Amino acid sequence: MSLFERLKADAGPQWSDYTRHEFVQQLGAGTLPLSCFKHYLVQDYLFLIQFARAYALGVYKSPSVADMRQSLDGVKAILDDELDLHVEMCRSWGMERDMIEEAPEDTPTMAYTRFVLDAGMAGDLLDLQAALAPCVIGYAEIGARLAAEGCDTDGNPYARWIREYASEGYQELAKGFIAWLDGTAGQTLTEHRYPRVLSIFEKACRLESDFWQMGLNAQD
Ligand SMILES: Cc1ncc(CO)c(N)n1
């Protein structure tokens, strides 16, 4: 069993609250109010800027060149690929990049990103990876599930979003992360340490749920 599978099993309720949140159900059904999605996506852009910093911290915390490259892939996936989705969708509503970047961070955005940065700063690479794991792996799981359920049809206003996270590129990124996490665990994880790693993972899942909830709360 990979470390990720073990964490997901032990944090079962937190994982399902996150990946099956009401926001995700409504997004899949295409019934999510646009005001909710817009607020979410602008906040997600601000979130990803901080996550790029967290992956950059991963470069700094890397014990080997191979780990540095993995962290760098995380930085690049955000800056070169994922943010394009946000800019493209925001532009379709008449919002340009500078307007997104000037938006104030909402509290759940600050809570989640600063939690991840602190877990990495106070701990080692494994602590940082445990805090980052729900993000990339969770979105890949959500994207794949919604696409398998046929939610990404042209009639769904959020099809572009679903296709992005269901895409082969994103699925590969998540698989790479799972393998990378296993590699670090093989070097540094002990049974004594496991509860602390699980606790970081669980908290990140709860912060993901709060992030969806922030979107739902933005209904006007
Ligand atoms: C809040 C959040 N979690 C995960 C991802 C996946 O990168 C994202 N874009 N935003």
Image: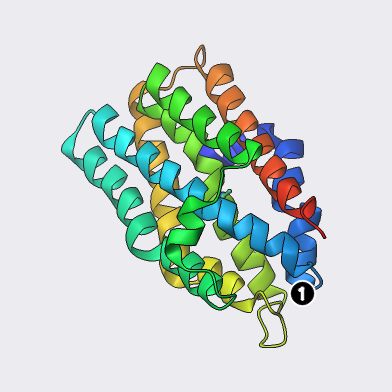
Q: Nearer the viewer, residue 129 or 190?
A: 129
Q: Quick check: can you spot residue 123?
A: no
Q: Tell me where residue 212 appears, x and y as whole percent.
A: 70, 50
- In the figure, residue 126 lies in which quadrant? top left
Q: Is residue 210 left or right of residue 64?
A: right
Image coloring type: rainbow
**Residue drawn at the location 34% of the way across and 57% of the way down:** 79
The amino acid at mark 1 is Gly
Query: Position of 184 compared to 101: left or right?
Result: left
Q: Quadrant of residue 152?
A: bottom right
Disc 1 marks which residue? Answer: 30
In the picture as drawn, the residue positioned furthest to the top comes out as 192
* Vertical relation: 213 (above or below) 33: above
Locate the C terminus and report the quarter of the image it occupies.
bottom right
Query: Camera-side residue: 181 or 90?
Result: 90
Q: Residue at x 35, y 49 (%)?
A: 74
